[in-house]
Amino acid sequence: TCINDVNEVNGGTLLIPGSHKVFEHNGPLPPCINLEAKAGTALLFDGRLWHGTGANRSDKVRYVTTMSCIVPWMRQQENWVLSVKPEVLASASPKLLHRMGFQALTYGGTCEGW
């Protein structure tokens, strides 16, 4: 969800339309587009869509929130151990730490139903 308006100047998401359908790619990348959206806009897309953060060339901080849905036995892409300030982790609740993946997972049986 876009907390602020996002555009090419403040580093809106860059994406390559249709790239989620590409299984192999050789050669130059197709041109990307820059997402422009008003604050409050939610962007939903397949995680295989080639995307990334654009450079923020404005003099203001740009905020967005992200969420992904993954099965419990698979790690998320973000490495919270490296990207969250230690003082934030020190004051985080057990529930937040769990949501960020700071626990050992052990599952018996199979992964059916995930």
Image (cartoon, grey):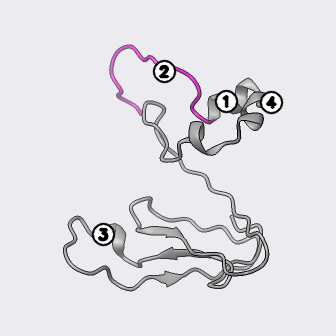
Q: Residues within 10 Å of mark 4 (few under 14, many from 20)?
A: few
Q: Residues within 10 Å of mark 2 (few under 14, many from 20)?
A: few
Q: Residues within 10 Å of mark 1 (few under 14, many from 20)?
A: some
Give the residue type at disc 3: Lys
Depth-wise, is mark 4 or mark 3 nearer the camera? 4
Instruction: Name which of mark 2 and mark 3 comes first in the sequence.
Output: 3
Instruction: Name which of mark 4 and mark 1 comes first in the sequence.
Output: 4
Q: Which residue is mark 3?
A: 21
Q: Which residue is mark 1?
A: 97
Q: Residue shown at 38%/61% (left/top)?
A: 48
Q: Residue shown at 43%/30% (left/top)?
A: 73
Give the residue type at disc 2: Leu
Q: Which residue is mark 2?
A: 105
**Residue 67 lies in magenta, yes or no?**
no
Q: Residue furthest top?
A: 108
* Of the pair 95 and 92, the residue shown nearer to us: 92
Depth-wise, is mark 2 or mark 3 nearer the camera? 2
For this view, does 26 lie left or right of residue 84? left
Give the residue type at disc 1: Leu
- Estimate the spatial distance between the alpha carbons at disc 4 and disc 3, rounded to whole Å: 42 Å
Marking on residue 91? 4
Image position, residue 54 (x, y; %): 57, 75
Magenta region, residue range: 100-114
Give the residue type at disc 4: Ser
